[in-house]
Amino acid sequence: MGRQYITRREFSQHTSKYLKLVGNTGQDLIITHQIGADLRITKIKANTLADLRGIIVKVHEVDINTPVLPGYDVG
């Protein structure tokens, strides 16, 4: 897969055209601004998205009735 470089102004004028290009070809699109790369648009692979859905980062269970401050009593 190749990359295509365009200016920010060109992208803003023809946004739908370039989004279709990325969606259909899978080609990366690099948007430049003042000679430097500013933004990269990449098509997300289906297996990567499925992998991300299945991940649980952290589960933290607490009892809201348990005091968190030392010496504090609900009673």
Image (cartoon, helix red, strand yellow):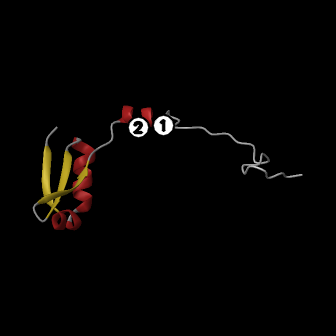
Q: Is mark 1 on a helix, strand or loop?
A: helix
Q: What residue type is labelled 2?
A: Leu
The residue under label 1 is 53
Residue 60 lies, with reference to residue 8, above or below; the image says above
Residue 53 lies, with reference to residue 68, above or below; the image says above
The part of the image, by quadrant, that contains residue 6 is bottom left
Quick one: quadrant of the N terminus?
top left
Q: Are marks 2 and 1 in contact (CB under 8 Å)?
A: yes
Nearest the viewer among 32 and 22 is 32
Please report the residue visible at 13 percent of the width from the left and 50 percent of the height from the top: 4
**Picture coordinates of residue 61 (x, y %)?**
67, 39
Residue 26 lies, with reference to residue 72, above or below; the image says above
The crowd level at tag 2 (other Cα within 10 Å; few <14, some 14-19, many 20+) is few
**Picture coordinates of residue 74 (x, y %)?**
85, 52
Please report the residue visible at 43 percent of the width from the left and 32 percent of the height from the top: 51
The part of the image, by quadrant, that contains residue 3 is top left
Please report the residue visible at 44 percent of the width from the left and 36 percent of the height from the top: 52
In the picture, measured across the screen, residue 66 lies left or right of residue 37, that is right
The residue under label 2 is 49
